[in-house]
Image (spheres, rainbow, N blue to C red):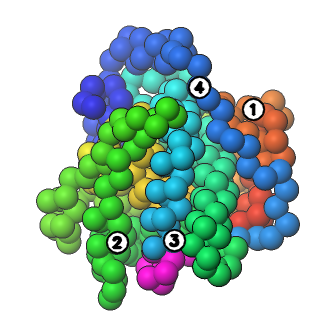
Amino acid sequence: MGSDESMWTRSDEAWGDPAEAIRVHQWLRGGASVRQPPRAPAVETAVYTRPSVAALTDTQKRRYIRAFTKLNTSGWLAPYIEIHNRFMMSMHGTMPGMPAARRRAAILQFLPWHRLYVLNFERQMRSADQAEALRLNEVVSDDFAVPYWPWRTYRAFPGLLDATMRRWLFDFHPDIVDSTGATVRTVRRDEPTILATPGPSTLPTASEVTNAMIAAGNLIHFVDPNLAVPGGGFSEALEWLHNNVHIWIGGTMAAVPIAPSDPVFWMHHAEIDRIWRTWTVMPFVGDAALRAPAMGGADFVLPGLTGPAGGAARSNDVLDVTSLGYDYDTLA
Ligand SMILES: [Cu+2]
């Protein structure tokens, strides 16, 4: 995996070749039909709390590995990876060479699309967690939620700063299978870089995130009104910072079509989602439209995903996390 158009680029890199991006997009559009991920339960009555990776117990660490392994080996992870590959030009506004005409829609899709994506994954992981507990005659509470990796403060790969089981995730390099059960890759990372931190790093800082949220005491527009400056709106600025985390991990995480193969992907995206959630409740006065931009209206469909109540998914359906059945232990 190394073709440039599918690698995440850093926020300080130039845009790629538009013709190449269009070619990739067309190829994806014409590619093999994607298996729909199994539908998540339609209604959640509980609100699940996503914890920080810094607060995980050893038991929770083992349960994450176990559920991820179960999801992968049963072939249920494969459709998630495939969907991210297939629609990557629809829901990442910073893809190299994004055609100008598609850019605004892709920027608008980035946060809502990944919110629902992580939520569907989380529900599958919860089922896998319960299935494994049942198989092994264990009693565990039905409380699984994807942990978030707060890389602004936890400035290391998840686990490496912990007192116990420090390498629980670092030493986990699953062999990812496709929907037929054939192994298609082993998850890889740039381990020398990861182990060298603290040091020169593309991991975004807290002040970079703050700058993406607020300028001169006001919330930044969700999307820059005229799209003049790449990274000028909240969502796009956050997306660029998110790219830098992918690049810091390297290997599988740095390649857009396969990045969800790495179990750390989901913790990273939970943190991105938590930043969005935080931004929407920040106590700033101002234009409500800043926080809740036109998401293209009720028909703004999130491609490839099943909606929270089944059927097609729309951006407007995912703006309120508590109605989706989850929240975070802390907002920041
Ligand atoms: Cu993505």
**Disc 4 or 2, which lies upstream in sequence?**
4
Residue 314 visible, this angle: no
Determine whether 109 is above or below 287 in the image: above
**Disc 1 or 3, which lies upstream in sequence?**
3
Residue at image coords 33%, 86%: 164
Does the segment drawn in magenta span residue 28?
Answer: no
User: What is the secondary structure assignment of the residue under circle 1?
Assistant: loop
**Disc 4 or 3, which lies upstream in sequence?**
4
Determine whether 166 is above or below 112 in the image: below
Could you tell me the amino acid type at mark 3?
Arg
Residue with the mark numbered 2: 168
Residue with the mark numbered 1: 300
Of all residues, the one furthest to the bottom in this rendering is 163
Could you tell me the amino acid type at mark 4?
Val
Q: Which mark is residue 63?
A: 3
Disc 3, disc 2: CB below 8 Å? no
